[in-house]
Image (tube, helix red, strand yellow):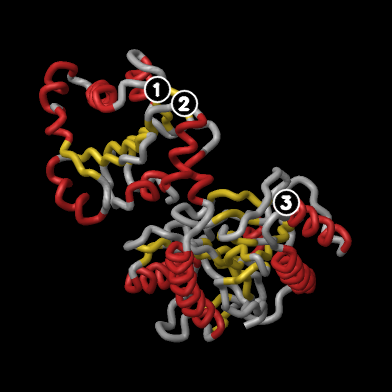
């Protein structure tokens, strides 16, 4: 994080400090502290760029190892004594904050309401409605890009395993059977194979989508039951590194054998739309231009969007310590900036035949979109 940028944010809001109380599950907290913690801890970033991480006593040594901040045990600041008096976790944390920075403070929208109210009883607080930290996060360093690239490579390894199982499957009564185990190939079993492989590589991928047939027309349907030949199977994998916390995101749509002609036509259109958008990416372009170009292309090709049919979601999103973060590639104004990492994922969905989605992830550079995704786009396997 650029410290001078954060200091300017505090100065612009006339705030003494930025205060966040959360776990590492909050990507802003992970970004600010580099500390992987499952219990909430307190981070204070002062206007002079002094940074304090206030943690339970048992976490002090690890916090000093994982971060370069000033690490303070909360008991050094009287946590036990204050809690004995107030008998309330949030009031206790509020008093500690007020003892460290009694002036006006900037807090995130994710601050627990009980803590925000406790703070507001005795000092001036300003909610960071501008999402300042997320905006800082969306510009990636070379190190962050490397983390995401590595996650993208892990996603490709898992995707290759999943598609190989589909490609080599035995078809019996239109259903796919695992050629290795002779068991029915299902959304659940294919997800297990993806999870198992990613865990071995040091990643987890909660929410992986393996959606087959007409139900794949629901973009975020995770999928359940048997996988079938001659049907679209959408596989969407978004793994997060157990070490760095950085995500990747990729989607492929495949079919064991030739699917319906409409699926073939949808696939060709989606693939073209993906590359159309990738080719348009450059610093300064408005994300809604990309979205509109893809929407117009689909319309020109006869793929109308209405209600729950057609191109029914955004074109993509930023990726980093969250799988969905700024910028949003939609109808909202958002000019792309160099060193943002974005996923581009056009899709078409029709309840009578199913869905098709293809997704690549890459970096915005001064020469265009540099894809981190190298996995081929093939419908029929």
Residue 25 horizontal/vertical position (percent): 37, 47
Question: Dot 1: what SS?
Answer: loop
Pick the residue in front: 325 or 71. 71
- Determine the CA span between mark 2 and mark 3: 31 Å
Q: Secondary structure at mark 2?
A: loop
Circles 1 and 2, Cβ within 8 Å, touching? The answer is: yes
Which residue sits at x=49%, y=62%? 238
Left or right, 235 with reference to 109: right
Q: Which badge, 2 or 3, is on the more N-terminal residue?
A: 2
Please report whichever mark, 3 or 1, sits nearer to the chain's N-terminal start: 1
Mark whose residue sits in front, 1 or 2: 2
The residue depicted at 35 percent of the width and 73 percent of the height is: 201
Crowd band around label 3 with a 10 angstrom C-alpha radius: few (<14), some (14–19), many (20+):
some
First in sequence: mark 1 or mark 2?
A: 2
Q: Residues within 10 Å of mark 2 (few under 14, many from 20)?
A: some
Q: Position of residue 259 (x, y in %)?
A: 71, 75
Where is residue 103 drawn, in percent x and y?
Answer: 36, 21
Q: Which residue occupies the foreground of this view, 97 or 269?
A: 97
In the image, is residue 19 above or below residue 364?
A: above
Q: Residue furthest top?
A: 121
Nearest the eye: 318 or 186: 318
Q: Position of residue 264 (x, y in %)?
A: 75, 74
Residue at mark 1: 104
Q: Name the residue tied to disc 2.
A: 14
The Cα atoms of the two marked residues, 3 and 1, are separated by 35 Å
Check disc 3 and report the residue beneath it. 286
- Mark 2 or mark 3, whichever is nearer to me: 2
Q: Are marks 3 and 1 in contact (CB under 8 Å)?
A: no
Is there any visible trace of residue 323 in the rendered image? yes
């Amino acid at each position: 994080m650029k410290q001078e940028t954060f200091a300017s944010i505090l100065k612009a809001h006339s705030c003494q400090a930025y205060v966040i109380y959360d776990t590492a599950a909050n990507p802003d907290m992970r970004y600010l502290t580099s500390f992987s913690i499952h219990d909430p801890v307190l981070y204070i970033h002062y206007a002079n760029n002094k940074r304090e991480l206030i943690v339970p006593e048992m976490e002090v040594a690890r916090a000093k190892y994982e971060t370069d901040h000033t690490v303070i045990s909360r008991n050094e600041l009287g946590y036990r004594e204050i809690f004995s008096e107030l008998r309330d976790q949030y009031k206790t944390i509020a008093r500690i904050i007020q003892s460290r920075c009694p002036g006006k403070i900037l807090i995130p929208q994710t601050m627990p309401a009980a803590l925000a109210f406790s703070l507001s009883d005795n000092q001036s607080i300003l909610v960071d409605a501008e999402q300042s930290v997320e905006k800082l996060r969306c510009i990636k360093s070379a190190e962050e890009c490397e983390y995401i690239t590595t996650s993208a490579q892990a996603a490709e390894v898992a995707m290759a395993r999943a598609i190989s199982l589909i490609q080599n499957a035995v078809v019996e009564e239109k259903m796919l059977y695992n050629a290795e185990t002779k068991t029915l190939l299902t959304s659940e079993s294919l997800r297990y194979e993806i999870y198992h492989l990613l865990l071995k590589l040091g990643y987890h991928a909660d929410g992986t989508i393996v959606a087959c047939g007409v139900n794949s027309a629901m973009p975020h349907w995770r999928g359940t039951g048997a996988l079938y030949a001659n049907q679209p199977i959408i596989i969407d994998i978004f793994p997060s590194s157990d070490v760095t916390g950085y995500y990747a995101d990729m989607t492929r749509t495949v079919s064991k054998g030739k699917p319906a002609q409409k699926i073939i036509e949808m696939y060709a259109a989606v693939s073209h739309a993906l590359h159309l958008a990738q080719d348009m990416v450059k610093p300064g372009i408005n994300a809604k231009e990309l979205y509109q170009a893809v929407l117009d292309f689909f319309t020109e090709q006869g793929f109308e969007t209405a209600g729950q049919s057609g191109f029914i979601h955004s074109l993509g999103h930023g990726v980093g310590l969250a799988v969905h973060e700024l910028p949003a590639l939609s109808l909202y104004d958002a000019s792309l900036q160099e060193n943002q990492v974005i996923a581009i994922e056009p899709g078409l969905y029709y309840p009578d035949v199913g869905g098709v989605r293809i997704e690549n992830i890459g970096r915005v550079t001064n020469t265009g979109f540099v894809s981190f995704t190298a996995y081929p786009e093939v419908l029929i396997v």
